[in-house]
Amino acid sequence: MKAESSSAGAKDELSQEGVPETLRQRICRVLKEENVALRIIPVFLYGAIACTARFLALYLRQLGLDAFRVGLILTIRPILGFFCTPMWGFISDRFKIWRFVFIISIIGTMLFGISVIFIPPAEREPCDIAISNLATNLGVSYNYSTTFNQSAYSRAYLNELEKIMVEKKVFEDKTWLYDERGVMVVFWEFMVAITLYELFFAANLSSLDVAIVRELKGNPKFYSKFRSFGSLGWIVGSLLSGGVLQYFRKVFTICGIDFTLTDYRCAFILMACFYVAALPIACTLKYDNIQNDKEYDVKNFVMILIKPENVSVYALAVFVGIVNSFGSYFYWHLENIGASQLLMGTATALRASAEMIWGLFFQSAVLERLGHINLLTLGLLLYAVRFFILGILTNPILILPIECVMGASYFAVWTTLVSYTVHSFPPQFTATCIAFLCSLFHNLGPGIGTVLTGFLIEKYNSTTTCIVYCVSLCCFLVLFRLARWNFTDVQPEKESMNLITDEEHEKDKMRESTQLNGTPTTQVQTPLPTVPKSYNSITKKGSS
């Protein structure tokens, strides 16, 4: 036994040519076998997003932009993403330049993202005009002679303005402080920078998903084990950016009023650092693990896309994206029920941690046991329960376990949608179908939902909005199951689990055998998957 173990250990230390491995060669082999690159790069990409995602609106408001202009800048992002993401996917698949698109998207996102720190703020109004604007906005009478003399009444007047600003919750509003023409210039400069940023960012996450799926060789149920490291990156990016911004948060006295200002440019610098770290890893990724010899035909892609069973799933993706838009107002709701800033940050960290734990240890096993449709159903049920509890919640501390469940359900729904999509399309459409899913889930749904959620909160309140979403989720869930039952002639819990894998894995085995033996092997006729109306029949019709 000792001899066998020692010979095995010696064999492990030999390279394929029989020469002992150096330490460098052994490290490279381990990194390649364990797919370390695909585990690290989600940390950097999602960490970069986390650095600025929560602070862009705050930065714009601090520069003097009003809520309407901030909303326009934030709305342009999902609109551009909805159109640009499928465009990048089509280009990647059509010309087979997946890695080139990924690298270009990282470089473009980094350059145009950090460009916003070079946009100078608008010029400030003279203090007499600024205080006059502030008093008008607050509905307070303004007297120049009493405001800027050295009497005690002057200080009392300014204190009164500060008190009213706190009561009306407009203390962070800086529109009165800056020249209107300068603010308009800043608005258009940010609009151009964010547009160019989003043009390249649209390919970031979908290209990462394509790299992971191709590395898994058509078996995307393990996609969650790689994507979960993105949640780790989100935690790291959020904590790091929050700590740095807290350090650069200073108190300034402007026109006699004390303001706490934050240098949000540090967050964009951190974002650029994350992208710089991700760039060399992206250059090493391989996109050739799935052999793709079939011609790219848009007609075949559309024919698969409009199948009733696929339409129902992508309608679910849009609806969940709409519901997820409540996250933009989540802190608003927590503040209304008395949550502290520490509790809000803890809830966010716990949610991201739950996403990572679920992805690493549970997602693949649960997906294999339940199937795509049943797991999507379970995820929608958990969404409904979460919004119901948020609607009746009075003790904010209870948000912590709720967000743990929400993190797991969000991650389960997204990774299941990715797995379903990859199983439903042939390999030549991998980037296109994933990009299309990203455009629905991350852009179209949130774009609609941001406007809808804002309207509901403005019309009613955040608590009523939670109940509305709970009822809507229950109604949509019933319609979704009815659609699967009426328009789909396959078993929901089994469908699309084996659309591609059997045939493709058989081809992979033949190629590996050919490479090892040097001679082609006899092809074994394997039966097609027992799923009616698979993409194979559609491809044959399109080719004929």
Image (cartoon, rainbow, N blue to C red):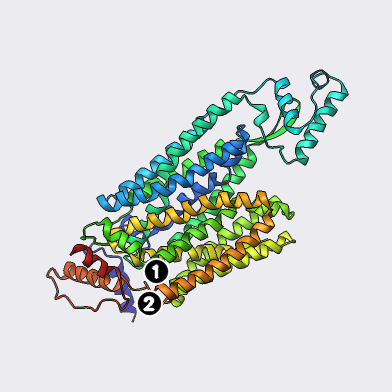
Disc sitting over residue 309 in the figure: 1
Report the side of 165 relative to 11 (left or right): right
Q: Amino acid at mark 2?
A: Val
As helix, strand or loop, the secondary structure at mark 2 comes to loop
Question: Extreme bottom residue here?
Answer: 1
Q: Check residue 163 in the rendering and tell me which mark sits there, or answer none.
A: none
Report helix, strand or loop for mark 1.
Answer: helix
Residue 434 falls in image quadrant: bottom left
Decide which of 45, 2 is in the foreground and name it: 45
Looking at the image, residue 363 sits to the left or right of residue 464; the answer is: left
What quarter of the picture does the N terminus occupy? bottom left
Residue sticking out furthest to the right: 152
Is 186 drawn above or below residue 416 in the view shown? above
The mark nearer the N terminus, 1 or 2, is: 1
- The percent coordinates of residue 341 (x first, y second) are 69, 50
Tell whether label 2 touches label 1 (CB within 8 Å).
yes
Residue 435 falls in which quadrant of the image?
bottom left
Q: The residue under label 1 is which amino acid type?
A: Glu
Q: Who is closer to the viewer here, 377 or 371?
A: 377
Q: Which residue is mark 2?
A: 490
Residue found farthest to the left: 519
3D distance between C-alphas at marks 1 and 2: 9 Å
Residue positioned 22% across, 78% down in the render: 526
Q: Position of residue 91 (x, y in %)?
A: 30, 49
Crowding near the residue tagged with mark 1, few <14, some 14–19, many ≥20 C-alpha atoms within 10 Å: many
